[in-house]
């Protein structure tokens, strides 16, 4: 996907939000310290930060912090749990949820992904299919296979794969109470 000027502006804005939010930056650094090769934090972690900022709300408590990793060498749930335990030792105040995106195609009955960003193409909504990671020099990278316009416009749109899963979209909309 070619980066539009609005998408580049949104990416710059999202990086600034993450850099200036001490809690978010600390959470990114915590996961970085596990030294996983292909990882990011996404979904509600990003969406909530942006939407709270846009709507001038105090920080909405997170149900969980979605840590995405991509490790095709170990598709076991045990590996995910090992990383969760490590993260809990580092920050027990965070509700961690680690999912190996290399195995999600089995659970979701989709095509196998090539990496973390590619796996996000199989998520259900565009504003949720956004993630970030931070490197050892504190440089933030944004992963957004569908761009950032919907996230910053607070629009909930099904991803292309979700058009065949509209009942799941409806259930998520009801569960999240999104308007």
Image (tube, grey):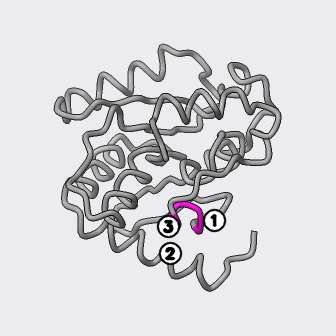
**In what element is the residue under mark 1?**
loop
Q: Which mark is residue 152?
A: 3
Between discs 2 and 1, the one toward the N terminus? 2
34 to the left or right of 110? left
Residue 104, magenta (yes or no): no
Residue beneath disc 1: 147
Measure how far apart labels 2 and 3 are at the Cα level. 7 Å
Instruction: Tell me the residue that label 2 is attached to.
Output: 10
Give the dominant element type of the magenta stretch: helix, strand or loop: helix
Magenta residues (range)? 149-153
The label shown at residue 124 is none
- Can you give x and y, in whole percent of width and height, for residue 8 in the image? 56, 80
Q: Quadrant of the N terminus?
A: bottom right
Vertical order, 150 against 105 (above or below) = below
| CB within 8 Å, label 2 to label 1 | yes
Given contact means CB atoms under 8 Å apart, are the residues at marks 2 and 3 in contact? yes
- N-terminal label among 2 and 3: 2
* Local crowd size for mark 3, using a 10 Å CA cut-off: few (<14), some (14–19), many (≥20): many
Can you tell which of label 1 and label 3 is closer to the viewer?
A: 3
Spatial separation of the CA atoms under disc 1 and disc 3:
10 Å
Residue drawn at (51%, 82%), measured in percent from left and top?
A: 9
Where is residue 153 drawn, in percent x and y? 53, 67
Nearer mark to the viewer, of 2 and 3: 3
Q: Nearer the viewer, residue 141 or 125?
A: 125
């Amino acid at each position: 996907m070619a980066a539009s000027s609005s998408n580049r502006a949104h990416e710059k804005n999202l990086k600034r939000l993450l850099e200036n939010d001490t809690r978010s930056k600390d959470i990114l650094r915590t996961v970085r310290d596990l030294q996983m090769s292909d990882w990011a934090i996404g979904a509600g972690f990003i969406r909530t930060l942006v939407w709270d900022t846009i709507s001038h709300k105090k920080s909405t408590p997170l149900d969980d912090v979605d840590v995405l990793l991509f490790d095709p060498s170990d598709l076991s749930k045990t590996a995910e749990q090992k990383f969760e335990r490590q993260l809990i030792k580092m920050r027990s105040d965070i509700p961690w949820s680690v999912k190996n995106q290399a195995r999600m195609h089995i659970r979701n009955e989709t095509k196998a992904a090539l990496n973390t960003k590619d796996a996000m193409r199989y998520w259900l909504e565009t504003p949720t299919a956004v993630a970030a990671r931070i490197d050892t020099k504190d440089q933030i990278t944004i992963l957004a296979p569908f761009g950032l316009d919907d996230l910053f416009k607070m629009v909930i749109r099904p991803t292309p794969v979700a058009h065949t899963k509209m009942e799941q979209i409806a259930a998520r909309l009801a569960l999240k109470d999104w308007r």
